[in-house]
Image (spheres, rainbow, N blue to C red):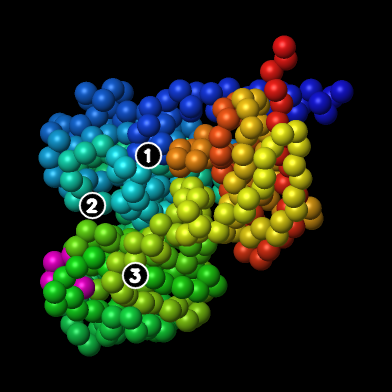
Amino acid sequence: MAANTIRAAATLALLLGSATALAAQDYCGGLGAEGIWIGGAEASSDLSGAAMFQEQMALVLDGGEYAALFTLSSPTDLRIEAAGRGGTDPVMDLFDQTGTLVATDDDSGGNGAARIEALLEPGLYCAVVRSYANAPMTAFVRVGRIEHEPLTEGLSGEDISIDDSVRPCDAETYAEALMFDVPGIASASEAPYWQFELPEGGPITITAENETADPLITLFDSDGNWIAENDDAVGLNSRLDLAEALPPGTYCVAVQALSDTTAPITLEIGAYDAEGAMRVQFDSGNIAPPLDGSYPVIDAGSVRTRLRQDAMIDNSTTWFSFDVPEYGLVVVEAIAAMEGGDPHLVLFDDLGRKITENDDIGSGLDSMVAARLNRGTYLFGVKDIASSAPVPVRLVLERFVPAE
């Protein structure tokens, strides 16, 4: 009886959260459905002409997220920051009104804080903040123009291995040459800067890979101006997807290793990879993949009463689809089948709107989501946040119909 009572209470709590999400507006393709206007209301959340920055305190529960909504009435150089309290580590993704990822960051604010600086076009945006460790977190979120006072120190406030007195594009002899579609391989201590040419400009994608090193990459123009930065886009690897075309010129990439500075890092630059950028979001569980066969989705079947399935899960999200034959309460559980497993669940409808997610239900590491669902097709994603190697996870789907 005690176990049933605990499970019922947990299900009710998740269900109440899900009902709120379903009733919310469809901001940023559903990613900001539970978002809060950074200025308290839409009218006061236009940062283009604001006299000062806007800031709020965000409470992020286990496996949850906070979405700050804001608008721009004209093109604006903006700084968006998230600083956790008590040593917590926020991760931030910036999406436009359509739900397209604009930028992502983990540690560019220094001391674990997230920081994005970008020239943004007019429109509505959602800054989605979550905890890197999927643990409860209290954080301050600030959105302001570049001339407004920053919340975070930036990487210049940290003890990093790169010589900040030397701008990477000042001297060709200082930066290693990087060619398009030709990987450059060196440790961060051997080659802290790489330089490349964009004679015709254009959108680009830059990747840095070696999880042992845990690379962090920063892109500068020829004058040493910061353009973009990323850490941990794909596991511990980094990726910059710059969909907006860069002007012709010389650019440099600063490479840091947050773990092993002697481990070789494979750095590569190429034309903007839109498909790859979306795949990163599918793999991370931030966005649900389409059901057109272009991305692997396992058909779990129709949930009439109860379904059970075992799967090998790693830290890249595995997606499942299922059908609900008629209205009812659907519960999805992910249970670690071995010690040390830590599954995380996220639930979407077939249009890609997030309904709810969960990590660590109760006092354990297993996960559970619950929602009242109408007849239709839905997707859930599961990943193990504790292991990059596949671990066994038992998945259970149950449907409960209203009493007559």
Query: Residue 122, image x and y in percent?
Result: 17, 41
The image quadrant of residue 142 is top left
Upstream in sequence: badge 3 or badge 1: 1
Closer to the camera: disc 3 or disc 2? 3
Query: Residue 131, image x and y in percent?
Result: 51, 45
The image quadrant of residue 149 is top left
**Residue closest to the eye, 199 or 310:** 310
**Residue closest to the eye, 146 or 5:** 5
Magenta residues: mostly which secondary structure? strand
Query: Residue 61, image x and y in percent?
Result: 55, 35
Task: For mark 2, give the secondary structure.
Answer: strand
Task: For mark 1, give the secondary structure.
Answer: helix
Residue 304 lies left or right of residue 262; in this view the side is right
Looking at the rendered image, the quarter that the C terminus falls into is: top right
Task: Identify the residue shown where x is 19% and y is 51%.
Answer: 119
Q: Which amino acid does label 3 sit on?
A: Ile
Task: Identify the residue shown where x is 30% and y is 67%.
Answer: 272
Q: Vertically, is 236 above or below 301?
A: below
Residue 300 lies left or right of residue 244; in this view the side is right
Q: Vertically, is 324 above or below 177?
A: above
- Give the magenta-colored segment's residue range: 246-251
Q: Vertically, is 370 above or below 241?
A: above
Q: Residues within 10 Å of mark 2 (few under 14, many from 20)?
A: some
Label 2 sits on residue: 118
Q: How crowded is mark 1: few (under 14 residues within 10 Å), some or many (20 or more)?
A: many
Q: What is the residue that sits farthest to the right in this orientation? A: 1
Label 3 sits on residue: 206
